[in-house]
Amino acid sequence: MRRVLVLVDGSSSSLDILDDAIRVGGDGGQLFLLHARAMSAKKPLESYDPDSPRAHVHREYLDAIAEGLRARRVQVEVIQPGSSTEGDVIGDAVRRAGADMIACGLHGHGAIAVVPR
């Protein structure tokens, strides 16, 4: 039983990680979903605003994924980032979820480091 933080970016290919995350979570494992994007070297880190319209769209996207996983009897929770800089969001989510591991489902464009938009 593991607690797995799953990063998805909104692309259809990012959802391919879900079955692997379920498998490594094991019986009684739990997934924690977080929306992510590639960091840009050209753009400075910004403060994350959980009340922004974009944050609400991301929450609806994650809620839809969570609903589908719950229909498969997967324990899942959506992680809404707190108000912090983009660079701190993943670490904060890991601590809040008590995650044992991170699974990244991204479309493959950009840097490996990921943070919410």
Image: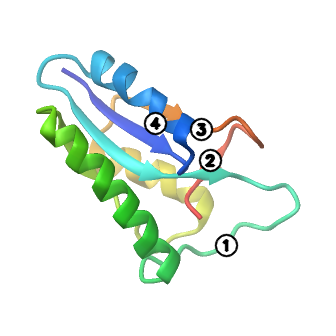
Mark 2 or 3, nearer chain start:
3
Amino acid at the residue labelled 3: Leu
Amino acid at the residue labelled 4: Leu
Label 3: few (<14), some or many (≥20) within 10 Å?
many
Mark 3 or 1, nearer chain start:
1
Relative to residue 115, is residue 44 drawn left or right?
right
Q: Nearer the viewer, mark 2 or mark 3?
A: 3
Q: Mark 4 points at which residue?
A: 15
Q: How far apart are marks 1 and 4 (CA)?
A: 26 Å
Q: What element carries label 2?
A: strand
Is the residue 6 above or below the residue 47 in the image?
Answer: above
Mark 1 or 2, nearer chain start:
1
Q: Name the residue under label 3.
A: 106
Q: Name the residue under label 1.
A: 46
Q: What element carries label 1?
A: loop
Q: Which of marks 3 and 4 is in front?
A: 4
Label 1: few (<14), some or many (≥20) within 10 Å?
few
Label 4: few (<14), some or many (≥20) within 10 Å?
some
Camera-side residue of 56 and 93:
56
Quadrant housing the C terminus: bottom right
User: Is the residue under label 3 in contact with that under label 2 (CB below 8 Å)?
Assistant: yes
